[in-house]
């Protein structure tokens, strides 16, 4: 039984209450399950004694886990922000990673995206992190982001994005955004506001893996890159608007021609690569 299967059996993807689990004749409770997977894992919250691993996928083999993921954005396979259409063949698990790629055929643009809507959700008291290398091409908007499971918008939390419309910034600066309504009401588009921060992790983000995370608590939202604080959001209006939208689901997506325009005169071979993703819940609240 691999790690992903083990967590599935334990109910880690749904957070179901389990008094004990028998694996190989040994009874494990939720805390010992967490301890086993905490040991040796890179990343995660700084004070892990207060956190429990709720969901984990290392994409170690086999098809996409349908109990956690659906292909596409949460609302479907097309978007109003670009001509991109999500197709299953552009979502692959290969060499121990999730890979999203873009292609163009007959004037159309196809790409990859996956989401956890109605399957894995989270809210305040959460730490969400993924290890990612981005697809580097003008016109490719790579994103690890989240929104309310109801699909009402705003709010939205962008754990990380890179925008590629030409220039050094495309490959070297990560962007971290929060969308909210100043009325704090979910779905109130007329009062929508966007707060953003940028960061330079070091090196080309399309050639190196980095860890991108958020810690979401009732009194703060913190963006991290490689365990370092990028920005803390403490505004009460922002935090109230986010909390009213909970629970959120999360997505990995490659949106093409939303920001910048991709060159269609040549084949696209670049991939957004996700090594792993983990969701922790705070046991101290």
Image (spheres, grey):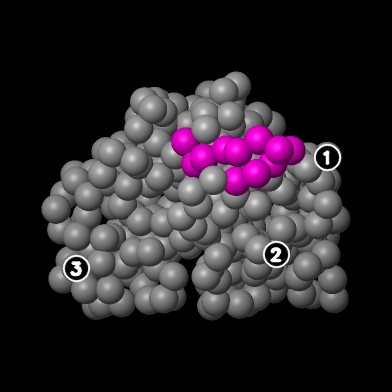
* Of residues 16 and 157, the one drawn nearer to the viewer in this rendering: 16
Q: Which residue is mark 2?
A: 66
For residue 263, the mark is none
Q: Position of residue 153 (x, y in %)?
A: 36, 73
Q: Quadrant of residue 176?
A: top left
Foreground of the two, 82 or 87: 87
Q: Is residue 28 magenta?
A: yes
Q: Check disc 1 and report its element: helix, strand or loop.
A: loop
Q: Please give left or right for residue 198 compared with residue 116 in the image.
A: left
Q: How far separated are the C-alphas under marks 2 and 1?
A: 19 Å
Disc 2 packing (10 Å; few <14; some 14–19; many ≥20): few
Q: Which label number is shown at residue 95?
A: 1
Q: Position of residue 88 (x, y in %)?
A: 78, 68
User: Residue shown at 19%/60% (left/top)?
Assistant: 240
The answer to whether the residue labelled 2 contacts the one labelled 3, judged by CB atoms less than 8 Å apart, is no
What kind of element bears circle 3? loop
Q: Is residue 196 above or below residue 152?
A: above
Instruction: Indicate left or right for 227 with 195 as reference.
Output: right
Sequence order check, earlier mark of 2 and 1: 2
Judging by the rendered image, the residue that carries numbered circle 3 is 184
Tell me which residue sits at (52%, 33%) in the image: 32
The residue lying at 52 percent from left, 70 percent from top is 118
Q: Which residues are magenta?
A: 21-31
Label 2, secondary structure: give it.
Answer: loop
Q: Is residue 158 left or right of residue 13?
A: left
Measure the alpha-carbon separation of dots 3 and 1: 43 Å
Closer to the chain start, of discs 3 and 1, is 1
**Which quadrant holds the N terminus?**
top right
Q: Is residue 89 magenta?
A: no
């Amino acid at each position: 039984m691999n790690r992903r299967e083990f967590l599935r059996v334990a109910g880690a993807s749904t957070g179901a209450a389990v008094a004990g689990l028998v694996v190989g004749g040994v009874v494990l409770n939720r805390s010992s399950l967490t301890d086993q997977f905490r040991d040796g894992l890179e990343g995660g919250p700084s004070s892990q004694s207060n956190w429990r691993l709720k969901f984990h996928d290392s994409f170690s083999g086999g098809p996409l886990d349908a109990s956690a993921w659906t292909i596409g954005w949460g609302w479907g396979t097309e978007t109003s922000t670009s001509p991109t259409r999500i197709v299953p063949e552009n979502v692959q698990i290969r060499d121990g990673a999730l890979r999203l790629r873009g292609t163009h055929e007959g004037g159309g643009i196809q790409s990859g995206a996956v989401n956890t809507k109605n399957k894995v959700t989270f809210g305040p008291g959460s730490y969400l992190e993924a290890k990612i290398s981005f697809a580097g091409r003008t016109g490719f908007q790579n994103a690890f982001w989240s929104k309310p499971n109801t699909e009402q918008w705003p709010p939205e939390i962008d754990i990380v994005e890179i925008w590629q419309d030409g220039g050094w910034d495309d490959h070297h600066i990560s962007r971290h955004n929060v969308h909210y309504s100043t009325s704090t009401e979910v779905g109130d588009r007329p009062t929508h506001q966007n707060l953003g921060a940028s960061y330079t992790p070091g090196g080309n983000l399309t050639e190196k893996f980095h860890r991108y995370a958020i810690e979401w608590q009732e009194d703060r939202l913190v963006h991290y890159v490689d365990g370092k604080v990028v920005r803390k959001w403490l505004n009460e209006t922002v935090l109230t608007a986010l909390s009213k939208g909970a629970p959120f689901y999360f997505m990995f997506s490659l949106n093409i021609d939303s920001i910048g325009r991709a060159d269609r005169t040549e084949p696209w071979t670049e991939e957004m690569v996700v090594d792993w993703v983990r969701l922790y819940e705070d046991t101290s609240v």
